[in-house]
Image: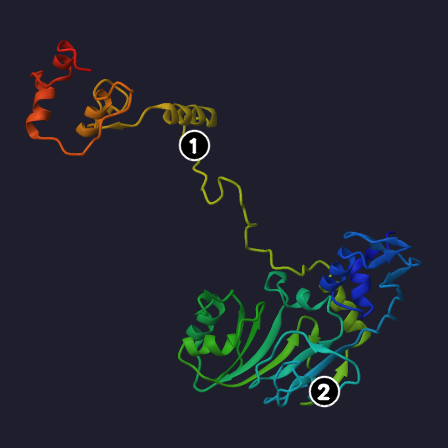
């Protein structure tokens, strides 16, 4: 089993610098791997020696992973920026560095997960991965079945349409909704579009993790059973957003749509027809552009300039102006025509 990692990741994991900065150090020749100059693409294996500017870089002690479930009260902002008042990190006051998985509106309350495991964040949050988040919502006036149906089918907000979701009535003004995406203030915007205002919103579940009886403002560690099932659920999830979006195609034919052949016409026939069409000269009202009679008339001044050259083979000065009589003479073969010029020896 290959337990190696990229050299830039190893340097970054030690806390020495970021991956990009590590790449710059490697490119500048300031990194040695096993006493040899490192190059981009090198991988680190346990037991290798790494030096930066002559100083030995040792592997950092792996930090124990932390997974917390918090019942966030309203008024707490989901941010890691400590200078912001009532931020979630200061509120939890955990002794180690952690960060929230996703967001929960400042005005909302309920379940939110915090961790120091960066590998699982996008796997949980990506809408492509179809991971459920469940909420209980209270609105300012009674709801009906039409409201439930519209919410479940998707609502146009933020220049898109929300994905279909599960909606269940719980009371005259309360409903339960299960989403697989997390647009900004999504539930509030959906209700607003239908003419309702949210007066209370609580998240009660993220995938297999439930809020249950956790008191408001308190946090707990995930149980081994919860963590095991969570990891199992995200095992096949991706970190990048790739579902529902075709890969970028930079080829020459990108953006063209395929038209299926008509009945009785094979693909080979269509290809041959296309080649014939490509070699056929362009026409205007049935007349060929390359025939004896051209569709576009040549500028008379240019036509005259072709025949008028001095003894050195250079064209005479062309003023770009010609009298109507001169043009008429050229067409009718009068004494001003090119033929008569030749007869008189004037070339």
Front residue (pair 330, 126):
330
Total marks in image: 2
Secondary structure type for disc 2: helix
Q: Select label 2 or label 1 by which is in front.
A: 2
Within the image, what quadrant is residue 195 found in?
A: bottom left
Residue neighbourhood size for the residue with mark 1, other residues' Cα within 10 Å, grouped as few (<14), some (14–19), many (≥20): few
The residue depicted at 68 percent of the width and 60 percent of the height is 237
x%, y% of residue 279? 38, 24
197 in relation to 209, above or below:
below
The residue depicted at 39 percent of the width and 27 percent of the height is 278
Q: Indicate left or right for 204 with 140 as reference.
A: right
The residue depicted at 21 percent of the width and 22 percent of the height is 308
Front residue (pair 29, 340):
340
x%, y% of residue 41? 77, 51
x%, y% of residue 169? 51, 78
The residue depicted at 47 percent of the width and 28 percent of the height is 267
309 in relation to 324, above or below:
above
Q: Residue furthest top?
A: 343
Residue neighbourhood size for the residue with mark 2, other residues' Cα within 10 Å, grouped as few (<14), some (14–19), many (≥20): some
Q: Indicate left or right for 60 with 248 as reference.
A: right
Secondary structure type for disc 1: loop
Residue wearing tag 2: 92
Mark closest to the chain's N terminus, 2 or 1:
2
Residue wearing tag 1: 261
Quarter of the image where the C terminus is located: top left
């Amino acid at each position: 089993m290959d337990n190696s990692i990229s050299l830039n990741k190893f340097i970054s994991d030690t806390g020495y610098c970021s991956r990009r900065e590590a790449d710059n150090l490697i490119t500048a020749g300031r990194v040695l791997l096993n006493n040899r100059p490192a190059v981009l693409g090198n991988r680190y294996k346990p037991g290798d020696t790494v030096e930066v500017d002559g100083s030995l870089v040792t592997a950092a002690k792996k930090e124990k992973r932390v997974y917390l479930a918090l019942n966030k009260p309203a008024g707490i902002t989901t941010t890691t920026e400590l200078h912001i008042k009532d931020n979630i990190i200061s509120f939890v006051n955990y002794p180690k560095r952690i960060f929230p998985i996703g967001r929960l509106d400042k005005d909302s309350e309920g379940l939110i997960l915090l961790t120091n495991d960066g590998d699982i964040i996008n796997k949980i949050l990506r809408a492509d991965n179809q991971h459920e988040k469940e909420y209980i919502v209270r609105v300012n006036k009674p709801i009906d079945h039409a409201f439930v149906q519209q919410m479940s089918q998707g609502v146009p907000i933020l220049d898109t349409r929300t994905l279909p979701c599960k909606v269940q009535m719980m009371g005259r003004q309360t409903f339960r909704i299960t989403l697989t995406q997390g647009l900004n203030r999504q539930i509030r915007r959906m209700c607003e579009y239908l003419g309702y205002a949210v007066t209370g919103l609580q998240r009660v579940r993220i995938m297999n993790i439930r809020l249950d009886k956790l008191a408001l403002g308190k946090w707990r560690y995930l149980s081994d059973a919860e963590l095991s099932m969570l990891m199992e659920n995200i095992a096949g999830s991706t970190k990048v957003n790739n579902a529902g979006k075709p890969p970028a195609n930079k080829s020459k034919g990108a953006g063209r749509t395929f038209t299926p052949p008509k009945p009785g016409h094979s693909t080979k026939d269509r290809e041959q027809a296309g080649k014939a069409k490509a070699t056929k000269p362009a026409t205007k009202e049935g007349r060929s552009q390359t025939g004896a009679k051209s569709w576009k008339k040549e500028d008379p001044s240019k036509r005259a300039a072709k025949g008028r050259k001095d003894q050195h083979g250079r064209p005479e000065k062309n003023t770009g102006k010609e009298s109507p009589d001169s043009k008429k003479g050229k067409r009718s073969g009068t004494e001003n025509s090119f033929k008569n010029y030749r007869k008189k020896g004037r070339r």
